[in-house]
Amino acid sequence: MKEIVAIIRRDKLSETRMALEDAGLGEMTVHTVNGRGRQGGTLMTEIDPEVPAEFDAVSRITRYPTPAAYALSHSLTRPVFWIPKRMIQVVVPDDKASLVIRAIMSVNRSGRFGDGRIFVCPIEETVRIRTGERGEGSC
Amino acid sequence: MKMVRAIVRPEKENDVVLALEAKGFPALTKANVFGRGRQKGLSVGAVHYDELPKVMLLIVVPDQDVETVLQVIQDTARIGYEGDGRIFVSPVLESYTIRTGEKTV
């Protein structure tokens, strides 16, 4: 079995859910997380304007120039160092992993930075709590 | 590739992030979680706290960088008392960048 962990944009969650349903896989776990990638954050204009900027978060990138660091030093627009994201976890049998990856990629790709990542991790055992069933049938 | 999940004290989160960034690992995901360890929470006088707030940092790094990341997190998150947290390392088989669709190994 494989666990697929995808970190995606917040506004793409329902589309991702629908894409997975179309692929015949409805089950998933959703986490609300904050994150950043190699760009070290972004600008307010890039994401939902209702999200407050974290001015007290001093974890700014200083080693190389980024949009967030540039905006901060030039007081241009509000930088956001931690971008609100959704993390989804799907556990599927081995043969369905590529199906899930393709479904997630097809709806989440916009071509701009911040589309997210997909990680595929091995899962040794799953147990369905209701029935006590183990193995592939329970995931 | 390895996924490093570190559960650290919320007040140490910023130190850990800055230290990781200085070592060249700017990308990570964090989540606010609640949990308890072997001590089953914390008792302050008559009040017992079952679960304590922690921050979970999730970083995926190449195999050769795992030791560096572990050392950095340990050095910055440790204050020497119970509740400093845990680090879990688990294997990652594949990693994809959604923007480009390519596999990053």
Image: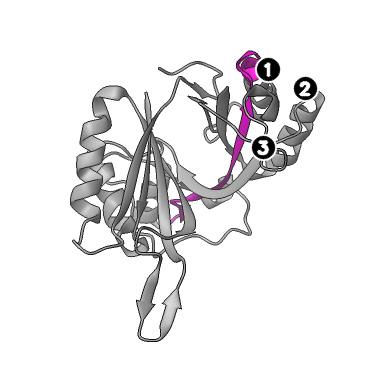
Task: Name which residue lies at 56% across and 28% down.
Answer: A3
Disc number for residue A99: 1
Tell me the chain of label 1.
A
The stretch of residues the image draws in magenta is: A76-98
Of the 4 image quadrants, the one containing the N terminus of chain A is: top right
Instruction: Quote the CA–CA distance across marks 1 and 2.
Output: 7 Å
Please determine if labels 1 and 2 lie on a single subunit: yes
**B29 or A72: nearer the eye?**
B29
Disc number for residue A132: 3
Task: Name which residue lies at 30% across and 37% down.
Answer: B25
Residue A97 appears in which quarter of the rendering? top right
Task: Kindly report which numbered mark, 1 or 3, lies closer to the viewer in this rendering.
Answer: 3
**B68 or B21: nearer the eye?**
B68
Disc number for residue A23: 2
Q: Is residue A80 magenta?
A: yes
Tell me the crowding category of disc 2: few under 14, some 14 to 19, or many 20 or more residues within 10 angstroms, Cα based: some
Mark before the other along the chain sequence, 2 or 3: 2
Task: Name which residue lies at 51% across and 26% down.
Answer: A124
